[in-house]
Structures are given as C-alpha cells and as structure tokens.
Image: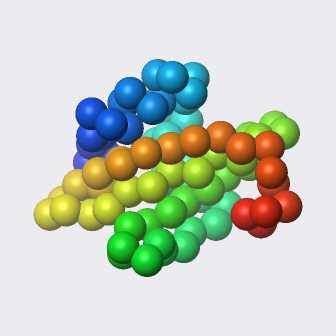
Amino acid sequence: MLIKFTKHALERMRTRNITKEEIIDTINNPDKETNDSFGNIIVQKVEKKFLLRVFYYIEENSKIVITAYKTSKLTKYL
C-alpha cells in the first residue's frame, strides 16, 4: 500500500528530525498498533532509547501519515 504524507506531517518530521525511512519502517514493522478516538491508526516502534509514534489513516489504497513524534517516555506508551 502506498504511503503518503500530509503537509503537516512533513513539517513536523522536519522539525523533529524524523526521516521518511523511519516512518515507513514503523508503519510496516510496528511494535504496537492501536486506534485513537477519531479512528486514526497509531503505530509505534522503539528505536534505541526513543519511541517513535506515527499517526495515519487509510484512504482508498494509501496510508496517509498525519503526524509523528519521538518520545523518551517509553513506559507511558508501552
């Protein structure tokens, strides 16, 4: 399935130093997957001492990335 990025996601990725490769790897190989109250899919993956969280939704044959962030609060989300 094709992975697309919203303008907001690209801006946040740039300011948070997150690469497209990290996002794609997290979507394709998540450690955990859940949904938020809006129906978006949240995937997360531990990378070294950080947790990468990616929010996206599915539209037609694409996964549309909304935003992503890294956090050091591993125990909060695992």
The N terminus is located in which quarter?
bottom left
Measuring 45% from the left and 32% from the top, which residue is drawn there? 12
**x, y (%) of residue 32?**
64, 66
Percent x, y of residue 63: 30, 55
Quadrant containing the C terminus is: bottom right
Query: Which colour assignment does the render follow?
Result: rainbow
| One can see residue 54 in this view | yes
Q: Residue at x 27, y 63 (%)?
A: 58
Which x, y percent locates residue 47? 74, 41
Asked where in the image residue 44 lies, by quadrant, the reply is bottom right
Position of 77 with respect to 25 (left or right) is right
Q: In the rendered view, tell whether residue 70 sits above or below residue 43.
A: above
x%, y% of residue 48?
Answer: 81, 37
- What is the total number of numbered labels drawn onto the structure image? 0
Image: 15 above or below 58: above
Q: Is residue 9 above or below residue 29?
A: above
Vertical placement of residue 49 versus 73, above or below:
above
**Which one is nearer the viewer's eye here, 32 or 8?**
8
Report if residue 19 is visible in the image.
no
Tell me if 24 is positioned left or right of 73 in this view: left
Q: Nearer the viewer, residue 11 or 57?
A: 11
Which residue is painted at 36% across and 49% down in the image? 66
